[in-house]
Image (tube, helix red, strand yellow):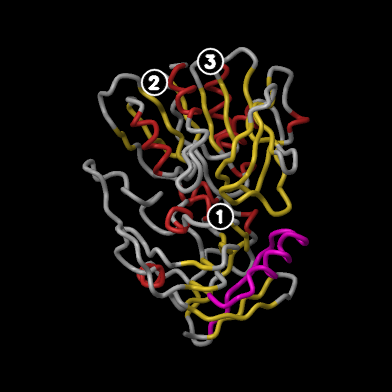
Amino acid sequence: MKDVTLVLSDGTRFYGKSFGYDACVSGEVVFNTAMMGYPESLTDPSYAGQMMVLTYPLVGNYGVPPFSFGQDGKLPDFMESDRIYASAIIVSDYSESFSHWNAKESLGDWLKREHIPGVTGIDTRQLTKVLREHGVMMGRLEIEGAETISSLSENEDYGSVNWVERVSCKDVIRYNEGAGKKVVLVDCGVKANIIRCLIKRGVEVIRVPWNYDYTSLSFDGLFLANGPGDPDMCGEAVEILKKQMSSSRKPICGICMGNQLLAKAGGATIYKLKYGHRSHNQPVREVGTNRCYVTSQNHGYAVDASTLGTEWRELFVNMNDGSNEGIRHISNPWFSSQFHPEACAGPVDTEFMFDRFITTL
């Protein structure tokens, strides 16, 4: 294993060893407090441009499942996309030995095959404390003799890039064709399990690029997917959404980035959280009730609920910091969640959000 130095933008340095692909990369350094689910998280397009720090100390002990695809050949069986999107993964203690009924290779071998750095031996508790106290920041990995393959140049900052444009599909893709109701899914960096959850409920899914004008298509409902980066970079998507909302009352549902785009189309503003919500244990409360749910989350931006228009209400709030976790329209069937009801990985307590959407079609 080669020596690795993680250098944060404030000059703080952490030292570890390489167990993945030896490459010098840069990205926004963020932490995730989940205890499992690294195959799903690494393949979540919402991590594009970010180096993922896992706070759970032991990582790699259950290996990596196969990169197989279903009968239609369009969706992976166990991953959330067709490749790793995170720039790097940083852990405290990497386990080279793995054991799981569905494991086909080690985490380290997978990272090497996909040219993604992995770092072990870093004091992730201290690193997380730095990010928690000072906020997420840019960082770079330095590996002696390694080539530089970075998604960010020296002059770029994470917030200056339209990451949604980089990860969205380029063409229209259809799933479950001919199955009754049709749902247009705006791909801002969609996780595969969102599509699986919709297909499981018997609808045809028409997946379109983030800036595709779907308003002339024939469909029954609109779904706004998750995605990476700053939603303020997605002006085209917001304008198309406004066009749709002004001409039709067709049901709309959003997840994560979709929540923020729906809020922006309704006139609200977005702000960046100090260190974001990335975990499987975020508690949220449904507004107007005492019902609380434990949710899976991955976002660094949030809706400023105080800027919502008079026709909009909060649907969920975060029980830790009071930030917005979903919105709803008071009269039209338009609603969204900031958390991930499809989970994968994480708790499935809120998968009923898909049922709510389907019943409105």
**Total number of numbered discs in the rendering:** 3
Q: Amino acid at mark 2?
A: Phe
- Provide residue 287's location: percent of width, then percent of height: 68, 25
Q: Residue at x 27, y 53 (%)?
A: 68
Q: Is residue 1 above or below residue 306?
A: below
Residue sitting farthest toward the top: 331
Label whose residue precedes the other's in the sequence (2 or 1): 1
Q: Residue at x 57, y 41 (%)?
A: 295
- Residue 191 lies left or right of residue 247; in this view the side is left
Categorize mark 2 by other alpha carbons within 10 Å: few (<14), some (14-19), many (20+). some
Q: Amino acid at mark 3?
A: Ser
Q: Nearer the viewer, mark 3 or mark 2?
A: 2
Secondary structure beneath dot 2 equals loop
Q: Amino acid at mark 1?
A: Ala
- Provide residue 329's location: percent of width, then percent of height: 63, 19
Proximity of marks 1 and 3: CB atoms separated by less than 8 Å:
no
- Provide residue 56's location: percent of width, then percent of height: 57, 63
Front-most of residues 155 and 285: 285
Mark 3–mark 2 distance (CA, rounded to whole Å): 14 Å
Name the residue carrying label 2. Answer: 219
Q: Is residue 193 above or below residue 268?
A: below
Q: Which mark is residue 247?
A: 3
Secondary structure beneath dot 1 equals loop
| Residue 179, quarter of picture | top left
Q: Is residue 135 magenta?
A: yes
Q: Which residues are magenta?
A: 120-143
Q: Which mark is residue 34?
A: 1
Mark 2–mark 1 distance (CA, rounded to whole Å): 37 Å
Label whose residue precedes the other's in the sequence (1 or 3): 1
